[in-house]
Amino acid sequence: MNYRHAFHAGNFADCMKHALLVALLQALQRKPGGLCVLDTHSGIGGYDLTSGPAERTGEWRSGIGALLDAPPDAALTPYLQIVRNFGAPARYPGSPEIVASLLRPQDRLIACELHPEDAATLRRTMGRRSGVAIHERDGFGAIRALLPPGDLRRGLVLIDPPFERPDDFTRAAQALATAAKRFPGGVLAVWYPIKHRAPVRAFLAEVEAAGLRDVITAELLLREPVDPTRLNGAGLLVVRPPYGFAETATAILDALSRLLAPDADACSGVSRIVDE
């Protein structure tokens, strides 16, 4: 998937990832103690949907555009409120902006971006915010270098590579294993594309072989994943999901499937990959 994220901001996969991200953070914030979020592949933070790459592809129209035009759904309300507050449908927040909007005074965000121009944009727009640190560096390397995050022993690691390299699934599985050891109190999440099933099956097998416990996946498929040239769906793998997250994720996926994937072959669901 050779792309800069700006071309795909606000598409169906973004909507799924970000709605679940909000649910994860809100579940973690039920406890009053501070937490740290490490966003390994942050992008530029926010995206203009009315011009440039996002406008040229128009993918957002069948993603966040469709959700904003749909009747309200309680499962999506927390996510959509953040998106509206950011300026949708003209502008769309990436994961660092979504996380920053939910930070409490005791929480922190570490946002990493390797692309120099994107990192500069991220630093310019978010670098002076309280509780936010921007790093121009490889996100996979940041897991080893920046975890554990000082005195904060709880939090979330969001791993969201572009999957432009053929070994990104393997690198993600290895990063999960490293994060699990270095941040034992952290929830770990990896977004992944679903074009066809073989790479995803191999990824899940690598995760299990790494010895990770308490692993679930949340997936949204627009159509049967039989065409490897198309993005047919997307998933979020979560290690150590917070209490109640699986049920919340199911409601979110049901709503997204109904609103964004009306095709008869579309499906969604939460599956347990490895027991606790």
Image (cartoon, rainbow, N blue to C red):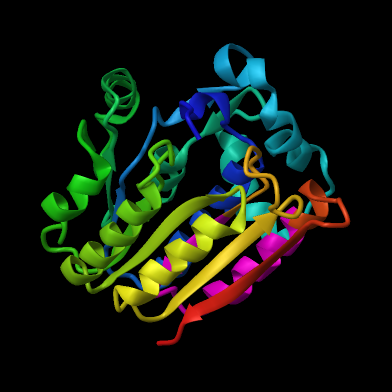
Q: Give the quadrant of residue 172.
A: bottom left
Residue 23 appears in the rendering: no
- Front in this rendered view, residue 246 or 90: 246
Instruction: Say whether residue 169 is left or right of residue 269.
Output: left
Q: Is residue 238 magenta?
A: yes
Count of numbered labels shown in the rendering: 0
Taking the spot 19% from the left edge, 47% from the top edge, the residue there is 142
Q: Position of residue 74 (x, y in %)?
A: 72, 60
Q: Is residue 91 above or below residue 264?
A: above
Q: Give the quadrant of residue 152.
A: bottom left
The residue segment tinted magenta is 235-256
Instruction: Say whether residue 222 is left or right of residue 90.
Output: right
Q: Position of residue 104 (x, y in %)?
A: 34, 54
Instruction: Say whether residue 6 is left or right of residue 70.
Output: left
Q: Position of residue 159 (x, y in %)?
A: 37, 51
Q: Is residue 156 above or below residue 153?
A: above
Taking the spot 58% from the left edge, 36% from the top edge, the residue there is 85
- Front in this rendered view, residue 217 or 65: 217
Q: Is residue 194 magenta?
A: no
Residue 253 appears in the rendering: yes
Q: Is residue 135 above or below residue 215?
A: above
Taking the spot 35% from the left edge, 40% from the top edge, the residue there is 41
Going by the picture, which residue comes out furthest to the bottom? Answer: 276
Q: Position of residue 48 (x, y in %)?
A: 55, 20
Taking the spot 68% from the left edge, 47% from the top edge, the residue there is 232
